[in-house]
């Protein structure tokens, strides 16, 4: 009978921090090898950790622990947490945040803007960190409140939801050692009930300090410092530190989205022993057996289908026999054969991870069924004679072996909490991945990989790690780029890498993430993305096949180009189609005005439409000569059919004008006019493109003679054109243009349009139809147009929406940032992608997912966490006795000596307001260097911290400081101004240093 799979839950993402392992791959290798990963500390290390000397010297103290390195590190900037707030957070909570982020990335889900309603189910061990802070006895009430929020388990689930913008249920689950597997059960039920679409389950058990334990004869802790579950030498448990996280989705939803699960949760169950046991701390065989039976029933499978059991496995003399008996009874009754099921016991490797133990065991079981390898129980020698082995379906593997159990591969996971809350889960190997569709394997001309981080060092680490991963495994470039585009948060420090295939991307990522061919680095401005301006080049930028790189790189371009060509006469449209897509089309033919102008217009119009489809919406437009017509059309001044008809007529009419020539000069307008006057030739000023660039036009003979006469006075360059645009030689075309424009509807611009006469036409401005004819005759005053744009949109970013980089150079000469989309005459799709990547690195709202080929989520290295070490002074080891707490009053200042008779007391020193405000910011936020323009909330502040700031300022000034004014002021500079104004009105008695 086929199981109903509608209630199955996929594990789509995993992350974890475990003793003795740099990552999950290394951890799994260690488990397969049967290595013990606990650490035995020497006395010096114990003292440095803050263990009292009396305990260090106690012969019953066992200095062994499953040590978690770098547990004090935290990427606080990534989570918008100030250094001071980070110090006050329990390391467990910090690592739970990082692991939640990593699990979402592992599943190909963006940690900050997932569209799925995501629940959080979290558990953590009691906070030794908070106890260490309280032991100092110096926490003032406000600091104590911060410590409670950052350490108590009530707040951890909602903190993760808040920091990751997750809107599903946020629930803290606390049932001692079984907490995280109970949290898994709770999350599964929430998914089945429709309370969320996705669920993060995270558990932490991190001791503070990480040290060891005091062995008590008859207690549960090992005297030998080794956890040996089900072994004849078992003498108790060893503690360890770790964090584990899994991401869950309904299986059918995950498969529909192309996600490849680690495995499938078939069923879970939770119960409690009640009082039918020897004592509160004692385990119950009846309770454990019942929960296993219930989980099998929920999974709708029998014991005969189970091949592996990840046990609670504490290695205690009482607990092991009870667990063995309960599991044997439950699985045997459910149909398991003798010796069928291999048992695992993670605590033998890592020690007991406390509240994270159940979830860590689940992850191990998922690896077992996915990889088809059964690891040994670490350190196992011989079976404990107290275990009942008669007809038991269980056996203890002493060496790694291939899976030999039933198929499909299924496993059980047990976790039992002190007090009697028991949990069990049944998992299965993942289904075979769906075959790739034909479209997914189609090669593309180029791919764009986007990577970001909170700071430059993390970005460089992430790029190198990703590059090495791609080199080693060579996943499909389409899968890689889609996963990066849709499954990663877009953070401030950014890197864009363009390449033709995975090997290209890998090589460039491992090149040190420095700028170079195909690589662009940038940082999103703190003020947000710059206003975007599209610039459209004029005649001379054309080249045969110029549509190809755009068609290959820009989604929507081909459709927009086809729509545009459809507005031209059929014969011309066919000729344009050929010229735009065939690099072998005769260049001299395309240079003819009748073809060049409509060709450029069509490409530029299609580029603008494609950019808009990618989220790159201009806030203004500008064009040069012919490009001005494109700008007007994009701005809504001309309708597309009217613009196409006008451009066609413009090209033909100018082609019929007398032959002419144009010469670019390396000087400004005034110098050009002086040279024209001195040369005495029949030439005109045709364009002023920048303060150091002008163009003159006239007959070919006059231009050649003028160039010879100049004889190097200024740099010159003969333009590739056979007509003298913007001169008297094009006047024969004007009557035709004017007549056509008289029949053309012209609208006010819908967005700012910088015209070639130097004016900036704002939305709503009336436009005279015949101005387009006048523009063909009059000089192009491009530098004035750029200046008008720069005044209207300070810091604007100019994108050259067409072939070439001429306008980009002019924009840069006007101190504007510019990005050409297809800079070289041999521009490729890869160059266009690189330019789009550059825009993304500058913070432009690029819809990166639309740039990707069809692909599926793939597992890639996630964020490279290596944050600074953060330990609150209140919690730090104090070998030299108590130390003053941050924020607490220091020693009383020495009293001034009494003045003698007749002496006047000295005036109190004036209050240094800037120093006061800066000092309080540094203390409350933990930042040492703060700029005047720094934003209190951007540095990690919140409304609660503003309240504390107001209280401290009020105490110093002797007046009430309005919180609302500080909230509105936000920056250090403006808050200082607020406080200075209050200080001027404060009583003189308050103005003391």
Image (cartoon, rainbow, N blue to C red):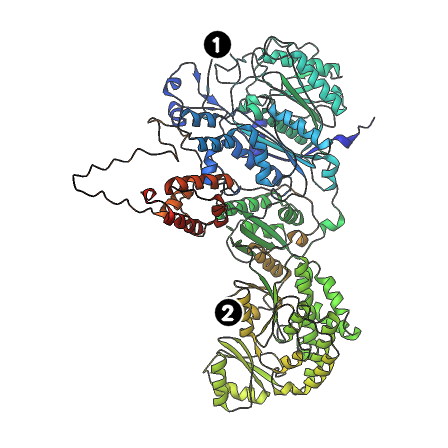
Q: Quadrant of residue 61?
A: top left
Residue 580 location in percent, x, y? 70, 69
Assign the N terminus to one quadrant of the image: top right
Q: Position of residue 920 (x, y in %)?
A: 40, 42
Asked if residue 336 lies left or right of residue 713, the reply is: right
Considering only vertical position in the picture, is 97 above or below 523? Answer: above
Quadrant (top left, top right, bottom left, bottom right) of the C terminus: top left
Q: Nearer the viewer, residue 560 or 334?
A: 560
User: Where does label 2 land, which residue?
Assistant: 814
Single out the mark in the foreground, 2 or 1.
2
Local SS, label 1: loop
Q: Residue at x 51, y 21 (%)?
A: 239
Who comes first in sequence, dot 2 or dot 1?
1
Q: Is residue 622 above or below residue 422?
A: below
Residue 569 is situated, as x and y percent measured from the top left of the image, at: 78, 74
Q: Is residue 7 visible?
A: yes
Residue with the most extreme right position:
1
Which of these two is toward me, 614 or 744? 744
User: In the figure, 68 relative to 911: above or below?
Assistant: above
Locate residue 213 relative to residue 782 in the image: left or right. Answer: left
In this picture, is 425 found above or below 935?
above
Q: Nearer the viewer, residue 664 or 670?
A: 670
Q: Which residue is mark 1?
A: 217
Q: Residue at image x 66%, y 75%? A: 767
Q: x and y percent of residue 147 in the render?
A: 48, 31
Question: Residue visible at 73% across and 80% down?
Answer: 742
Q: Of 19 and 912, which appears nearest the observer?
A: 912
The answer to whether residue 548 of the structure is visible from this angle is no
Image marks 2 and 1: residues in contact by CB distance under 8 Å: no
Q: What is the CA distance from the residue labelled 2 to the residue labelled 1?
A: 82 Å
Could you say whether the residue bearing mark 2 is in a helix, strand or loop?
A: loop
- Figure quadrant of residue 197: top right
């Amino acid at each position: 009978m086929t199981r109903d799979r509608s209630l199955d839950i996929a594990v789509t993402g995993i992350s974890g921090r475990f003793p003795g392992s740099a990552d999950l791959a290394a951890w799994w290798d260690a488990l397969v090898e049967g290595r013990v990963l606990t650490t035995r500390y020497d006395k010096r290390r114990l003292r440095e950790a803050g263990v009292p000397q009396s305990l260090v010297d106690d012969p019953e103290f066992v200095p062994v622990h499953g040590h978690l390195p770098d547990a004090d590190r935290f990427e606080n900037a990534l989570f918008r947490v100030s250094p001071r707030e980070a110090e006050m957070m329990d390391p467990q909570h910090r690592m739970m945040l990082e692991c939640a982020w990593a699990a979402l990335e592992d599943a190909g889900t963006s940690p900050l803007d997932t569209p799925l309603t995501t629940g959080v189910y979290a558990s953590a061990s009691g906070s030794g960190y908070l106890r260490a802070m309280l032991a100092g006895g110096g926490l003032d009430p406000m600091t104590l409140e911060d410590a409670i929020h950052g350490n108590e388990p009530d707040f951890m689930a909602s903190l993760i939801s808040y920091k990751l913008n997750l809107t599903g249920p946020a629930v803290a689950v606390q049932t001692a050692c079984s907490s995280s597997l109970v949290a898994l059960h709770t999350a599964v039920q929430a998914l089945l009930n429709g309370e969320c679409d996705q669920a993060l389950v995270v558990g932490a058990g991190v001791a503070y300090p990480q040290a060891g334990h005091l062995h008590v004869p008859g207690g549960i802790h090992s005297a030998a410092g080794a956890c040996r579950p089900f072994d004849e030498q078992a003498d108790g448990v060893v503690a360890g530190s770790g964090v584990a996280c899994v991401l869950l989705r309904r299986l059918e939803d995950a498969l529909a989205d192309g996600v490849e699960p680690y495995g499938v949760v078939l069923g879970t169950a939770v119960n409690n022993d009640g009082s039918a046991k020897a004592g509160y701390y004692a385990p119950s065989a009846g309770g454990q057996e019942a929960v296993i039976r219930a989980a099998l029933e929920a999974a709708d499978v029998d014991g005969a289908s189970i091949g592996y059991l990840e046990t609670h496995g504490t290695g205690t003399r009482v607990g092991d026999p009870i667990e063995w008996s309960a599991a044997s009874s439950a699985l045997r009754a459910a149909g398991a054969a003798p010796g069928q099921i291999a048992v695992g016991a993670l605590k033998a490797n890592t020690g007991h991870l406390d509240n994270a133990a159940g979830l860590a065991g689940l992850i191990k079981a998922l690896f077992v069924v996915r990889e088809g390898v059964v690891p040994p129980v670490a350190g196992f020698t011989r079976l404990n004679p107290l275990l009942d082995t008669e007809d038991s379906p269980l056996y203890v593997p002493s060496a790694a072996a291939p899976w030999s159990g039933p198929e499909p591969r299924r496993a059980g996971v047990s976790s039992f909490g002190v007090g009697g809350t028991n949990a069990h889960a049944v998992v299965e190997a993942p289904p075979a991945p769906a075959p790739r569709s034909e479209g997914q394997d189609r090669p593309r001309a180029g791919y764009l990989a986007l990577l970001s981080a909170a700071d430059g060092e993390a970005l460089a680490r992430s790029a190198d790690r990703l590059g090495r991963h791609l080199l080693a495994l060579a996943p499909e470039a389409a899968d890689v780029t889609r996963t990066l585009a849709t499954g990663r948060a877009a953070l401030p420090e950014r890197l864009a890498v363009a390449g033709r295939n995975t090997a290209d991307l890998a090589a460039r990522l491992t090149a040190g993430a420095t700028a170079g061919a195909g690589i662009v680095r940038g940082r999103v401005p703190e003020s947000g993305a710059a206003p975007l301006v599209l610039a459209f080049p004029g005649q001379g930028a054309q080249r045969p096949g110029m549509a190809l790189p755009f068609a290959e790189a820009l989604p929507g371009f081909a459709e927009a180009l086809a729509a545009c060509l459809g507005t031209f006469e059929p014969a011309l449209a066919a000729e344009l189609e050929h010229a735009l897509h065939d690099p072998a089309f005769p260049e001299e033919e395309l240079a003819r005005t009748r073809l060049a102008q409509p060709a450029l217009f069509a490409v530029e119009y299609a580029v603008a439409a494609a950019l808009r489809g990618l989220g790159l919406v201009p806030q203004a437009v500008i064009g040069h000569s012919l490009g001005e017509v494109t700008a007007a059309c994009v701005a809504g001044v001309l309708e597309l059919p009217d613009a196409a008809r006008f451009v066609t007529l413009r090209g033909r009419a100018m082609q019929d004008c007398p032959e002419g020539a144009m010469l670019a000069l390396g000087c400004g307008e005034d110098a050009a006019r002086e040279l024209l006057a001195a040369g005495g030739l029949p030439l005109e000023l045709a364009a002023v493109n920048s303060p150091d660039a002008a163009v003159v036009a006239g007959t070919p003979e006059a231009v050649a003679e003028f160039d010879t006469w100049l004889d190097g006075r200024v740099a010159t360059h003969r333009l590739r054109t056979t007509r003298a645009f913007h001169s008297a030689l094009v006047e024969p075309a004007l009557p035709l243009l004017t007549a056509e424009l008289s029949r053309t509807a012209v609208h006010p611009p819908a967005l700012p349009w910088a015209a070639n006469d130097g004016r900036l036409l704002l939305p709503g401005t009336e436009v005279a139809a015949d101005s387009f004819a006048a523009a063909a005759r009059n000089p192009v005053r491009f530098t004035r147009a750029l200046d008008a744009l720069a005044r209207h949109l300070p810091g604007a970013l100019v994108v050259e929406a067409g072939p070439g980089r001429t306008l980009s150079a002019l924009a840069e000469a006007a101190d504007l940032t510019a990005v050409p989309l297809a800079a070289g005459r041999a521009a490729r799709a890869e160059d266009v992608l690189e330019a789009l990547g550059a825009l993304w690195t500058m913070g432009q709202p690029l819809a990166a997912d639309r740039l990707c080929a069809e692909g599926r989520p793939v597992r890639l290295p996630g964020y490279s966490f290596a944050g600074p070490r953060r330990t609150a002074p209140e919690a730090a080891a104090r070998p030299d006795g108590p130390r003053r707490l941050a924020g607490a009053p220091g020693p009383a200042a020495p009293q001034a000596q009494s003045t003698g008779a007749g002496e006047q007391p000295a005036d109190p020193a004036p209050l240094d307001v800037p120093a006061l405000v800066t000092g309080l910011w540094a203390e409350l936020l933990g930042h040492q260097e703060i700029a005047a323009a720094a934003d209190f909330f951007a540095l990690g502040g919140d409304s609660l911290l503003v309240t504390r700031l107001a209280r401290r300022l009020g105490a110093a000034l002797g007046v009430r400081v309005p919180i609302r004014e500080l909230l509105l002021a936000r920056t250090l500079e403006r808050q200082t101004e607020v406080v200075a104004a209050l200080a001027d009105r404060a009583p003189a008695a308050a103005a003391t240093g």
